[in-house]
Image (cartoon, rainbow, N blue to C red):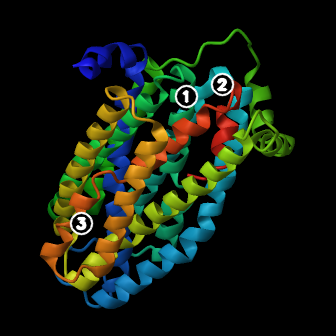
Amino acid sequence: MYFWNNFGSLIKPYLIFEPAYVLFNIAVFISDLADTNLCLQKTCRFNVTSEPDIRTPCDDEKGGIQFVASINSKYVFGLSFITVLITVLMSAWTDKAIQRRKLCILFPMVLKAVQLIGMCLHSYFWYWPVLLAVFTENILITSVCMRVASIVYICCVSSSEDRTFRLTLLYVLQTVTHIISSGSSGFLLRNFGFLNTYILCTALTFCAIIYLQIFVKDVPTESKTGFLKYVRDFFDAKSLVQAFKMVFRKREGNARTVISLLAVINNLAWLTYIGETSVLYLYLRYKFGWNEQDYGIYILYKMIGISIGSVICIGLNKNFKISDSAIATFAAFWDILASLGYFFAAKNWQLYLIPILDIFHGFALNVCDSLQSRFFESHEFGKKKMMNFN
């Protein structure tokens, strides 16, 4: 009861940010599956010059899966370096331009819209080379930039006592959007095709941009600086050096050691998450013969379980005052069990047991963000995210 009585008061002042976040993530999650399937279909079908019906068998299913898996491990890794560079610059810049936090949220939205328009063109001009589609899809991983910008914004507008709750709420919304997207992405692709699916995602992204511009306000501050100075500050290499020095500067007690350890844990946890999302669909398609609709149903089932786990963790934190570190350790233990489940699963029914172990999936990441934020001042939140390249 305490949780629900305080729910409204905690999120009411800044609830207007969340609808834009939801719209953006729905577009991202639907387009993610479409991107993987577009590259697969362009590779596994021979002599096709227009968008095919993906309900028909591929000419070379195994070859297509192997190709997409290889680009996920090679090309995407290289192109992701650009994402890291832009994210680091954005993180350092947002601390200087604290009243322009909203621009860092707007940036990945606009870029995602451009990417989706590019993928619409790849769907219409099917004969365009697949590697060009890979480059268009991965030139910048916008969901990473959005995650960084959203967490920085939440840290700025919430107190240290409510930060874990606010960040968890953000993760719950992300999970809910994943549920919506997972339940619809396979259906959309099989019944409406790539072009119409990308058009829908583009429309959702533009709705998020319009909503953000109308309703979401920047973090208030008394300082005012010209726009051109912000542009110069964004590409200031000196700010990168200063930011790294700030992250690892001496602090009271063992704060610097804790920050460094949390950074390592955060990046290792995120690495396993990225690895899972990049190959899980291909793995299930190859080993168990699933299609995009089967995968969508499975992820829908998995995300519902994760939503339940997130609510449990919020309740433990708010109602029973269990520490963040204890919850993170508890969640990490279940993540390990779920990983072992994927390793040993050999039949379809066994796969459907894994989400039961994975209901606390990703919660440790949010707790790490909350714990780290307690060692930084409000003008350092962006630099804090520099050491977590996620």
Name the residue located 66 percent from the left edge and 40 percent from the top edge: 384
Compared across the picture, whether 140 is left or right of 215 comes to right
Name the residue located 44 percent from the left edge and 34 percent from the top edge: 167
**Residue type (three-letter) at the residue carrying disc 1:** Cys
Position of residue 36 relative to residue 46, above or below, is above
Q: Secondary structure at mark 1?
A: helix
Write down the quadrant of residue 52 in the picture. bottom left
Mark in the foreground, 3 or 2: 3
Q: Secondary structure at mark 2?
A: helix
Q: Residue 198 versus residue 232: which sits nearer the camera? A: 232
For label 2, the residue is 378
Question: Quick one: label 3, few (<14), some, or many (20+) residues within 10 Å?
Answer: some
User: Total number of numbered labels?
Assistant: 3
For label 3, the residue is 354
Name the residue located 27 percent from the left edge and 53 percent from the top edge: 359
Name the residue located 80 percent from the left edge and 45 percent from the top edge: 240
Q: Which mark is residue 340?
A: none
Residue 328: x percent and y percent?
A: 44, 47
Q: Secondary structure at mark 3?
A: helix
The tag earlier along the polypeptide, 1 or 2, is: 1
For label 1, the residue is 155
Question: Quick one: label 2, few (<14), some, or many (20+) residues within 10 Å?
Answer: some
User: In the current view of this chain or complex, which residue is farthest to the top?
Assistant: 222
**Residue type (three-letter) at the residue carrying disc 3:** Ile
